[in-house]
Amino acid sequence: MQDFIIRVLVAGGIMGVFDAVWLSIVANKFYKSQIGKLLLEKPDMTAAVIFYVIYVVGIVAFVINPALEKGSWQHAVGYGAFALGRSADGRCRRAKFLVLAPWLICIGSLLHGTRRGLCGS
């Protein structure tokens, strides 16, 4: 259990740093140009914390731990990239029928989801 908690903290820290850079530098201008009127003044940090806890625990349980047990970095990369499919599901499904979810946002979100999964793993 102690190893699991350490892995969650390390993966969460790595993902937090990369997400902070992505959201503050890259995504800030990108999302404002695409859906600016829909964005909150400040992010909902409660929702963010809930998402990250669930996401990081999932990455550790389903990607990092199995990869360490198998001794396979390829397993970690393969299943870490699975975040692309997870991201594609909701984001691109919305893009096909909502005016508020343009395809450019879908592609940007896919890249971000894939990067997040790979960084965490």
Image (cartoon, grey):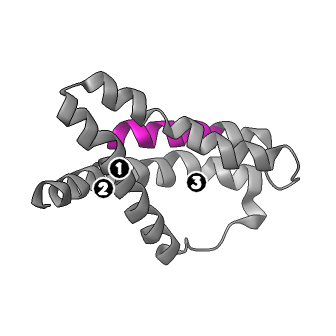
Rendered image: mark on residue 28? 3
Mark earlier in primary sequence (3, 1) = 1
Depth check, mark 3 against mark 1: the one in front is 1
**Residue 116 colored in magenta in the image:** yes
Image quadrant where one finds the C terminus: top left
Q: Which residues make up the magenta segment? A: 108-121
Residue that lies at the very extreme toward the left in this rendered image: 2
- The answer to whether residue 76 is above or below residue 86 is above
Amino acid under disc 2: Gly
Estimate the x, y position of residue 99 in percent, counting from the top left. Answer: 88, 53
Residue in the image at 37% along x and 47% along y: 18
The residue identified by callout 2 is 12
Query: Disc 1, disc 2: CB below 8 Å?
Result: yes
Estimate the x, y position of residue 47 in percent, counting from the top left. Answer: 52, 72
Residue in the image at 62% along x and 74% along y: 41
Secondary structure of residue under mark 1: helix
C-alpha gap between disc 3 and disc 1: 17 Å
The residue identified by callout 1 is 15
Estimate the x, y position of residue 104 in percent, counting from the top left. Answer: 74, 39
Badge 1 density bin: few <14, some 14–19, many ≥20, Cα 10 Å = many
Depth check, mark 3 against mark 2: the one in front is 2
Dominant secondary-structure state across the stretch colored magenta: helix
Say if residue 105 shows up in the picture: no
